[in-house]
Image (tube, rainbow, N blue to C red):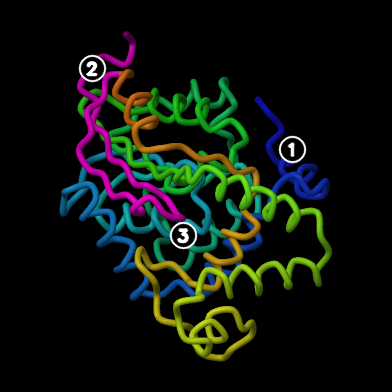
Amino acid sequence: MLDTTAGSTEEIEAGDRFAFGDNWTSFAGLVDEERIASATESLTQSLGVTDLTGLSFLDIGCGSGLFSLAAHRLGARVRAFDFDPASVAAATELRRRFAPGAAWSVETGSVLDADYVAGLGRFDVVYSWGVLHHTGRMWDGLAAAAALVAPGGRLFVSIYNDQGFASRNWRRVKRTYNRSGKAGRMLLVTLSGLYLSRHRPLWALIRAVRPGRRTAPAPRRRGMSRRHDLVDWVGGYPFEVARPEEVFRFITGRGFVLRHLTTCGGGIGCNEYVFERVGDPAA
C-alpha cells in the first residue's frame, strides 16, 4: 500500500501539491445545520432520490467530510477516505461533532493505490466531487472510481471543464501559488478574486476574501464557502481538465449510462455527472 501520508506531505513541501487538507480544516469550522442541509439537498437533487437508507456510499477524497455527513443523514452506510491526512482529521472531527457512533468510517487512502482500491469492494453510490482532477492522474482515478460501483449503482463525479488556453493559464497560476511564499499567495488570491468577481460589486469581493471576520457567511450552493472555494481554486494543484464529451465517452464505455449532467456553460468550474452502471463490472 502507498504511504499516502508521506507522499502528500512531501509534495506539499516541494510546491507540487496544494494543501487541500488545511483549507478543508478551516472550512469545517463553518459547518452547521444550514450547510449540512444544503449539502444534503444537492445530493438528493443530483442523484434523483430522497433517501439512501440501506445503501452503501463511498466518498473518494472526502475533504471536510460534509458530503459523507449528508449521505449519513440520508441513511447510507458511509465509507470515506482521503489522500491528505489533514482532510481525514477534519472529516473525523466533523463526524465526532455531528454523528458520533455513526456507520461512517474515515480513513487515509489513495484512489491511485491499486492494492488499497482492490480491498474496498463495491458500493451503491461512489461520490467524488472535484477530486479526481487533483490527483495528477485524472483518468486513472476516474477509471478506479468507476470500477468501485456495484451493478445498478451510481457514480457521482465532477471534473473541471476544459477551457483550452484559459485552463492552461490557470494551471500556471496554480503552480505559481504553490511555489510562492505567504505574501505571493495572498497576492494571487486577491488578484484572482478581483478577476473572477469583476462583474460583482467590490464590497462583495472584500467580504468574501477578508480573513478573520466574526460572522460566518451564508453558504453557497452545496453548503460551500466562497472564501474557501476561492483559495481552493487558485491553489488547487495538480490540475487537470476534460470536456464533457470526453468524460461521457470514457465512462459509458465502462458499462454506464448518463443519468444527470450539469455543466458550467463552457466557462470556469466543474461539470457534474451522475452515471448508472448497467453493465457487469467484471466485464
- Above or below, 83 against 182 in this view is above
Is 259 colored magenta in this rendering?
yes
Q: Position of residue 169 (x, y in %)?
A: 63, 50
Q: Which amino acid does the dot numbered 1 rest on?
A: Gly
Q: Earlier in the sequence, mark 3 or mark 1?
A: 1
Is 147 located above or below residue 170 in the figure?
Answer: above
Span shown in magenta: 255-283
Closest to the observer, 265 or 15: 265
Give yes or no for contact between labels 3 and 1 (Cβ–Cβ under 8 Å).
no
| Residue projecting furthest to the top | 283
Q: Which residue is mark 3?
A: 95
Q: Which residue is mark 2?
A: 279
The residue beneath circle 1 is 7
The quarter of the rendered structure image containing the C terminus is: top left
Neighbour tally class for label 3: few under 14, some 14-19, many 20 plus, Cα within 10 Å:
many
- Where, by quadrant of the figure, is residue 231 drawn? bottom right
Q: Amino acid at mark 3?
A: Arg
Identify the element where label 1 is drawn: helix
Q: Secondary structure at mark 3?
A: helix
